[in-house]
Amino acid sequence: MKQHYDILIIGGGMVGASLACALLPASEALALNIAVVESHPLPESGLSYNPSYDSRATALAYGSRSSYELMGVWQKLAEHLTPIEHIHVSDRGRFGVARLHAEQERVPALGYVVENHWLGRVLLDRLQQPDAGRIDFISPAEVIGLNPEADRMSLLLSRDGEQHRLSAELVVMADGGRSSLREQLGIGYRSDGYGQHAVIANVSPDKPHGGVAYERFTDSGPMALLPLDDQAGLHRCGLVWTVPDDRVDEIMALDDEAFIERLHDRFGYRAGRFIKVGERHSYPLKLMLAEEQVRSNLVVLGNAAHALHPIAGQGYNLALRAVVALAEQLIKARKQGVPLGDLAMLQQYHQGRLADQQRTIGFSDYTMKLFTNRNPLLAAGRNLGLQLLDICPPAKTLFARSAMGLDQPAPELKAALKPELK
């Protein structure tokens, strides 16, 4: 552990570790000293896959594949990924339905589902390779204080019962939606509750999922079913079930048989008959957006910057696009001799992200409200819209490209590494 770093990342989860991996190829050539501070212990060395029926998973848009390819981790990630080959969108009680197919869009998959623990292990394993000598992974440890100075951030770090004073030219806060440091620095945020909870669990249908991801809209909230790999001879899908706040305790208290019966009542039998449900968890749904995402010597990233409704599964993909954009900006700044904490440079990064944030957040927010509105005219209109989408190839392609994250410019991380770096 050094006393001063060029970049210090608070949070070694999927977002923080992804940023470190994105910066790693340039770290040696540009003499970038980077630290990742994580409150949980670093896993034992060696990359192993530990399957679990109840593993939580994340949907990666097809466009996110390019980002992880540039980081050099995609090949390893792909060993335990489930491709989304088809997307089925429907509205409960209505005839409207839209179907997307990877083959028709001329891509190998519309997206991928990865278990969070596997993605985390692959990223952390990358940061422990011999060429990652300029990246220090400090764990278990916690940043308990941040103090802005003239050209850097001063940090108070707690580790093994002792406190240490560090400094960094740039601090990146990727410590999640409940960031106490964000509050400590007086960074306000917009928070709009949806009056809903997400109930998440893994379920087993009695037939293979066939690579189909389902988005099912109901009058009480959307439902998503993501394809996962089989476990112990059982087919497996990841369920995200949106329920009103006043119903969540009732749903969570159901035994397995009653839960499955209630699930079929809302979802139907398109995926087959569910024969098993695993551990259930729930959390409240809110739209959260930090009022400041950059300051001198500071960037707020991931869930600390924004949290979306899980509809369409775009939250993590939005964060990953910001990771690549920030890495690109920092590499260019270093090459040009611009301080990594320079406010004008960081504002340029943020301005470049605003349109993507507004579009993605607006889409998830508007879609959720549209499909939960019980107005008969709106219901008829959205039903017609789904039918038209299903029979109109150009419109379907536009929708598919948006869902795959292909409506955004391709990552330029590779370009940022040239010509000086090979």
Image: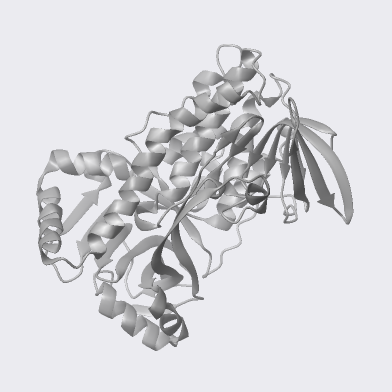
- Residue at the spot 44% in from the left edge and 43% down from the top edge: 318
Q: Residue furthest right?
A: 162
Judged left or right of residue 239, residue 150 is right
- Residue at the spot 52% in from the left edge and 33% down from the top edge: 324
Give residue 407's quadrant in the image: top left
In this rendering, the answer to whether 131 lies above or below 81 is above
In front here: 197 or 90?
197
Judged left or right of residue 180, residue 308 is left
Give residue 5's quadrant in the image: top right
Q: How many marks?
A: 0
Judged left or right of residue 398, residue 45 is right
**Percent from the top left, x then y, of residue 307?**
47, 52
Q: The C terminus is located in which quarter?
A: top right
Q: Residue 330: in sight, yes or no?
A: yes
In this rendering, the answer to whether 35 lies above or below 139 is above
- Colour scheme: one colour
In this rendering, the answer to whether 289 lies above or below 379 is above
Q: Residue 85: in sight, yes or no?
A: no
- Residue at the spot 44% in from the left edge and 88% down from the top edge: 255
**Percent from the top left, x then y, of residue 397?**
21, 40
In this rendering, the answer to whether 165 lies above or below 193 is above
**Percent from the top left, x then y, of residue 31?**
73, 21
In front here: 286 or 221?
286
Give residue 99's quadrant in the image: bottom left
Q: The N terminus is located in which quarter?
A: top right
**Percent from the top left, x then y, of residue 268?**
24, 74
In front here: 80 or 405?
405
